[in-house]
Image (cartoon, grey):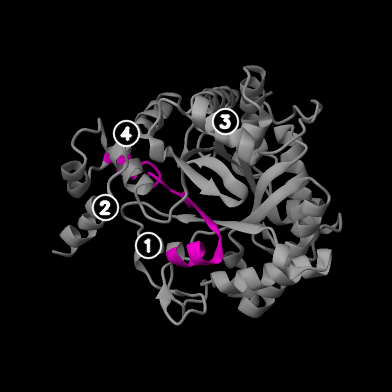
Amino acid sequence: MGFVKATSMRMIEGAATAEGTAHYAATRGGALDAGHYSDFRGGLKVSAVGVGTFPGEATDAVDEAMADIVCKAVTQGINVVDTAAHYRYGRSVAAAGAGLRKAFAAGIPREAVWIISKGGFVRFHGAVADPAAFIRERVIDKGLAAADECVGAHVLSPAYLRAQLDESRIALGLHTLDAFLVDQPEVQIGKHGKETVLRRLGAVFAALEKAVADGVLRHYGISTFEAFRVATDDRSFLSLASLVSLAEKAAKEVTGSERNHHFALVELPFNAVMLDGFVRFNQVTGDGRDDSTLQAALKLGLYTVASHGLFKGHLARNPLDILVQAMPRLANDAQRALQFNRSTPGLGTTLVGMSTPVHLDDVLAVARAPVLTHAAYMALYRRTEN
């Protein structure tokens, strides 16, 4: 059966707070490295490595393992959990909810944990013979999106994103999400063009600002694969400054004030071989210089989350000599890859997708190790250039 059907539980109130996360960092994180927690908007302390819930087969066994991983991580100093409405046909978000309930029952306050979900991709109910027919029946015919707002399995409409936000809340058993991300809106640019996608994204932002006003969401953002890593003339490119402008307009529409928008975080792939977020200067913030995505995010007050921390496991199986030489005391290549990310200036949290409990041991080992100094980290790039 799995956890995906477990939607009748009591909804847990609350959200992550500055006081709750600070107390958590001082207690549950007491044995971890002092640099393990990053600062999020409003003074929240969130772990520099978080639990991702993307990988694994759609089986009861993986559901159970994922719930155990989430519970163990949250009780041992990892207070970021990332999921999505569509991961593993919706089983991941429900499994994450089961793990969180175990952690809360073990004494972890809801206010200590920062929980992210995503929407945009359709949640199929297992393998379907005709995905287009499924989308027509479950999305278009129900009035959640117009046909041209659906590109493949991706939907960019305010009603559908709000529905997936609520679906995530129910599956997690939480009244309020700390963050909700619009997943990979750039996939629609090829069909509709950037102007149309940005206009529709602005309408989605307004719906998410309304969700904040309704008390079911604290912050929102976008999760991308290409949009922040490509050159500015690539059709998939998205400007951080433009997205902030959309959020300001959305906030003004909903609250009357553009200054108090809740667009607060962005997610992009980053690891020791996918370096674009740090080395490609493709963003402009208005100060007369070009910045990398990580630099621009800092200037704009946006928190950055890295996906693909282990490059789908490749960095755990294929050693990079430069990381081995720089971090010989770490036990394995997975730990070195994660430590590289933890040491990256401007990067807030790196996600590690886990469905095998033993992998959490590497995450906790890295969390106990001091990050590289800034000089040692930058030396890695100089050595690569040479």
Q: Position of residue 72 (x, y in %)?
A: 52, 23
Q: What residue is pinned by disc 2?
A: 377
208 lies left or right of 126: right
> Which mark lies nearer to you, 4 or 1?
4
Indicate yes or no whether the magenta region holds residue 176: no
Amino acid type of the residue that numbered disc 3 sits on in the rendered structure: His
Q: What residue is pinned by disc 4?
A: 369
Q: Position of residue 268 (x, y in %)?
A: 49, 56
- In space, the residues marked 2 and 3 are separated at their CA atoms by 30 Å
Q: Secondary structure at mark 2?
A: helix
Quarter that holds the C terminus:
bottom left
Indicate yes or no whether the magenta region holds residue 304: yes
Res 193 seen here: no
Q: What residue is pinned by disc 1?
A: 278
Amino acid type of the residue that numbered disc 1 sits on in the rendered structure: Phe
Q: What residue is pinned by disc 3?
A: 23
Kindly identify the residue that appears in the image at 66 percent across and 55 percent down: 220
- In space, the residues marked 4 and 1 are separated at their CA atoms by 23 Å
- In space, the residues marked 1 and 2 are separated at their CA atoms by 12 Å
Q: Position of residue 309 (x, y in %)?
A: 41, 46
Query: In which quarter of the view is residue 136 placed?
Result: bottom right
Amino acid type of the residue that numbered disc 2 sits on in the rendered structure: Tyr
Q: Residues within 10 Å of mark 1 (few under 14, many from 20)?
A: some
